[in-house]
Image (cartoon, rainbow, N blue to C red):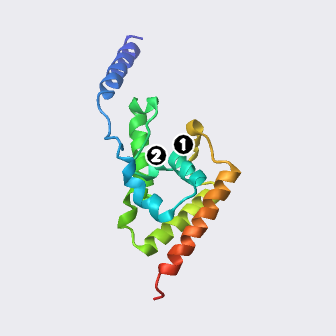
Amino acid sequence: MKILKKILVALLIVFVIMQFFGPDKNEGDMASVDAFITETNPPDAVHEILKNNCFDCHSDVTKYPWYSNITPVNYWMADHVKHGKGDFNMSGWESYSVKKKDHKIEELIEEVGERHMPLPSYTWTHGDLTDEDIEAIVAWGKQVRAQYSAQIQPE
């Protein structure tokens, strides 16, 4: 029993020490999504959906809940944000070609339409999109794609 107690104390000490270390946070400026918002011109309702459900993982602006300060949760969240921004980064929109923008919006329509986004781990604490939210995002996405398709030159 003494060994078990020593192991538990050692684990507690390691856990406490881990709390002093963590990944860098993704706390950029809302201005980083201005180019995306200006170019894609989402209706107010869609803009709110994006802000409340997408910016956290797909832009340089993440709103962190209280539990994100607890290690190892902070590393898990940092990994989600890193992968989210790697797949689709609204803050990096200006650097995308028109063809890439069209493809990213196509993926957005597919992922949201098939309810793959937002991730279940995100919706547990933030709530899920309603059917109306999904319809609004898909309709807006199709309009944006039509604009990009008109700009893409045939090869």
The amino acid type, in three-letter code, at marker 1 is Tyr
Q: Amino acid at mark 2?
A: Asp
Residue 154 located left or right of residue 111: left
Instruction: Note whether 112 is above or below 76 in the view shown.
Output: below
Q: Contact, CB < 8 Å: mark 2 with mark 1?
A: yes
Q: Which label lies toward us, 2 or 1?
A: 2
- Identify the element where label 2 is drawn: helix
**Quarter of the N terminus within the rendering:** top left
Where, by quadrant of the figure, is residue 108 drawn? Answer: bottom right
Residue 122's label in the rendered image is: 1
Which of the numbered marks, if any, corresponds to residue 56?
2
What residue lies at 39% left-to-right and 68% top-to-bottom? 96
**x then y, percent, for residue 58:** 45, 53
Q: Residue at x 56, y 36 (%)?
A: 125
Whether residue 51 sits left or right of residue 59 in the image: it is right
- Look at 29% across and 27% down and name the residue there: 20
User: Which of these two is toward me, 13 or 83?
Assistant: 83
Picture quarter containing residue 146? bottom right
Residue 102: where, in percent of width, then height? 50, 71
How far is disc 2 from disc 1 in space, using C-alphas?
Answer: 10 Å
**Residue 115 to residue 62: above or below:** below
Which of the two residues, 21 or 136, is positioned nearer the viewer here?
A: 136
